[in-house]
Amino acid sequence: MRILITGGAGFIGSAVAKALMDRGDFPILIDNFNDYYDPKLKRDRIGVFLGDYAGKFSLYEGDIRDRTFLGDVFGSEKPEKVIHLAAMAGVRYSLERPELYADVNMMGTLNMLECARNSGVLNFVYASSSSVYGENEKVPFSESDPVDHPVSVYAATKKSTELLANVYSHVWGLHTTGLRFFTVYGPWGRPDMGVFKFVANIVEGRPIDVYNGGEMRRNFTYIDDIVSGTLVTLDADLPCDVMNIGGDRDEALMDYIAAVERHAGRKAETNMLPMQRGDVTRTVADISKLRALGWAPSTRIDDGIARFVEWYRSYYSPRVSGDV
């Protein structure tokens, strides 16, 4: 099938594109290669993941806020399904640039929904976030839990995209599924994420910032499990739904750090800091809905971190010494 992926040079988007090509689908990638983090990493992802697939994908450089650009891509490529991952990410930066987050995440998604509706797209899978749950006290977080009290602008924009998708499903019959991602980590990850910074700083012998005294818990989800879950929902063609997609273990942040230390062969120097605005102490997923579609996470955190550390050393070599 012809599958349009926004954020196609991103961490998740590029990995999903490779998986689609491996099974014989034709991905059409859109990315604006912005400088929220180093664009070189995005271009290198494309080079490494897609370098052996010449003629088996299309790549367009452009912005999802540009409706004319999107119309041209939909018109020429005629995608059958969409995986919409492009967004301004990150909780803390959203508090500094709220207007940018609203513009990209909400208006960009509205543009994509409109193009998908007008083009007869069969299924529209989009990225939501575990951040929509805010400081939900009930764990694990279930899709049926109220999500009306976000604690960051980023979370509010993601909740808004779910509402928009719901409208397009119920008014125009566009099949939509929102994926609430829980703490994704692994090779080729986003450098702004704490899970990436822990690996980078520990491997390179720099101090790490640990917020809330380390008293935080997460469902850490390895990139391969995110990819497989995304494809399951893409193939399911659900009329209208949201799904948690996360690891199946409630992990302490300090255990994640300890695993990085083991595989890096170096003890971390920690700066213990108070909780940051907009962050939450615990995100734990009830993944029973996605399990019912036949999906389950398969990568344990120790194995995932081992691969992550190995990739980091390989990608940033020779700047990172091999004997750390």
Image: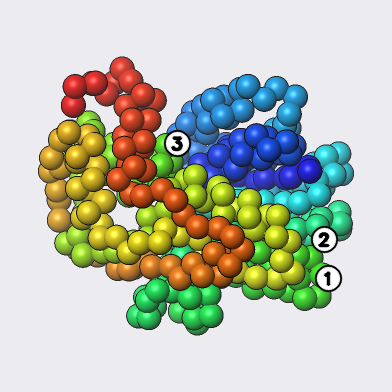
Q: CA distance from mark 2 to mark 1?
A: 7 Å
Residues packed near mark 1 inside 10 Å, few (<14), some (14 to 19) or many (20 plus)? few
Q: Residue at x 70, y 22 (%)?
A: 54
Q: Mark 2–mark 1 contact, CB under 8 Å? A: yes
Seen from the viewer's position, the closer of residues 233 and 207 is 233
Mark nearer the N terminus (1 vs 3)? 1
Give me the residue at 53% from left, 80% from top: 144
Q: Which residue is mark 1?
A: 172
Above-or-below relation of 297 to 291: above
Assign a secondary structure to mark 2: helix
Q: Quadrant of the N terminus?
A: top right
Residue 200 drawn above or below residue 129: above
Q: CA distance from mark 2 to mark 3?
A: 32 Å
Q: Please indicate, yes or no, whether residue 197 appears anywhere in the rendered image.
A: no
Q: CA distance from mark 1 to mark 3?
A: 37 Å
SS assignment at label 3: loop
Residue indicated by mark 2: 117
Asked which secondary structure carries label 1, the reply is: helix
Q: Residue 11: percent from the left, percent from the top? A: 51, 42
The amino acid type found where label 2 is placed reads: Arg
Residue 313 visible, this orientation: yes
> Is residue 143 shown above or below 230?
below
Question: Is 299 on the left or on the right of 318, as rendered?
Answer: right
